[in-house]
Amino acid sequence: MPQITGAASLGFSHYTLYEALPRLASIGFRKVEISSFNSYCFHFNYGSPSPEELKAMLDELGLEAVSLNYYSRSYNAWEALEIQSFVQDWRRKLEQLSTVGIRMMTMSFGIRNDRSDQQLQIENAAKAFSLMGEIAKDYGVRMLLEVPHLYGIMNRPEMVLDVFDRLTSENVGALIDSSHWGIIGYDLDRFVSALGSRLWHIHLRDSRGADTGDFLQKLELTPGTGTVDFAQMAEILDRYRYQGEVFLDFEYRDMGLPQIMKEYFNGLRHLQSCGWTLPDGIRLDDVR
């Protein structure tokens, strides 16, 4: 059965890393993903903590930061000049990762829209990702695309595969999020097969509802409270002998810390009942 390997800090999106990381460690996780965006969940933007402070915190807690789920801002994929801005933004962040020891980072270029020049936008996205992939290689960092993503230019598998066909860098891989799969409803078996060795990372959380295209989908649910078929996902990943990272990407806002912890335990129990193997040392009781 597939192995859960770590958890993201996104579950504590309205709290600091100083509150999030000790709680993930108390559950028993040893691998973490740091989440940091432009409008909320400011876990590793530019300020507190500094790269040196983050490394010290991780070392003290015995944690390894495997990846950074990072989002700077939206880019107009139909404007070629945006590629330069995108590369500058992500390159600046790369310079901080070596201090912490983070070896993977997400990137995104282009927001979902209904313009008539979708093919041009796909071409520009592929150019941007290829450039960033080669730059990141010099830093020893692998770049990830979370795909398909309901809010991005690549919101369907065929768009994703089109971009991967156009990539000129081998240093770019795919991240599949179960909550987006649950709503889009694409053929996961076929998509995993098509990605092959480009699939490097998995995010686990629940969702429900249809793709309304309005950025209001229910994507932030604890496993067991939505409609995602986690047992089927486990079976498919097993079939293709997936050996990459699998992280809980739970996300909670406007929720107290005790309730967040309960959600983690409930989600872990549900995933275990669906056939997922938990990391050694995980506790499922209500620790603080």
Image: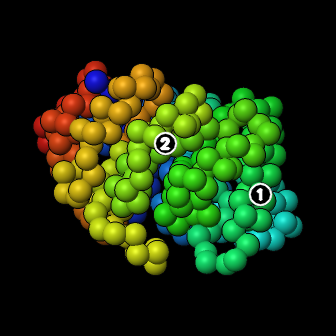
The residue closer to the viewer here, 239 or 144, is 239
Residue type indicated by callout 2: Phe
Circle 2 crowding by C-alpha within 10 Å: few under 14, some 14–19, many from 20: some
Query: Mark 1 vs mark 2: which is more N-terminal?
Result: 1
Between the C-alphas of marks 1 and 2, the distance is: 20 Å
Picture residue at 35% right of the left edge, 33% below the top: 236
Residue 191, disc: 2
Q: Give the residue type that dot 1 points to.
A: Glu
Percent position (x, y) of residue 284?
16, 35
Taking the image as shown, residue 21 lies to the left or right of residue 281, namely right
Q: Which mark is residue 275?
A: none
In this rendering, is residue 53 above or below 123?
A: above
In the image, taking residue 253 as reference, residue 47 lies left or right, namely: right
Toward which corner of the image does residue 195 lie, by quadrant? top right
**Residue 223's spot in the image, x, y percent?**
24, 50
Q: Which residue is mark 1?
A: 123
| Vertical order, 208 against 284 (above or below) | below
Badge 1 element: helix
**Residue 203, horizontal then vertical, whole percent:** 42, 44
Residue for point 38% across, 31% down: 237
Q: Is residue 206 shown left or right of residue 139?
A: left
Q: Is residue 251 visible?
A: no
Where residue 218 appears, as percent x and y from the top left, is 33, 67
Q: Which quarter of the rendered picture does the C terminus lie within?
A: top left
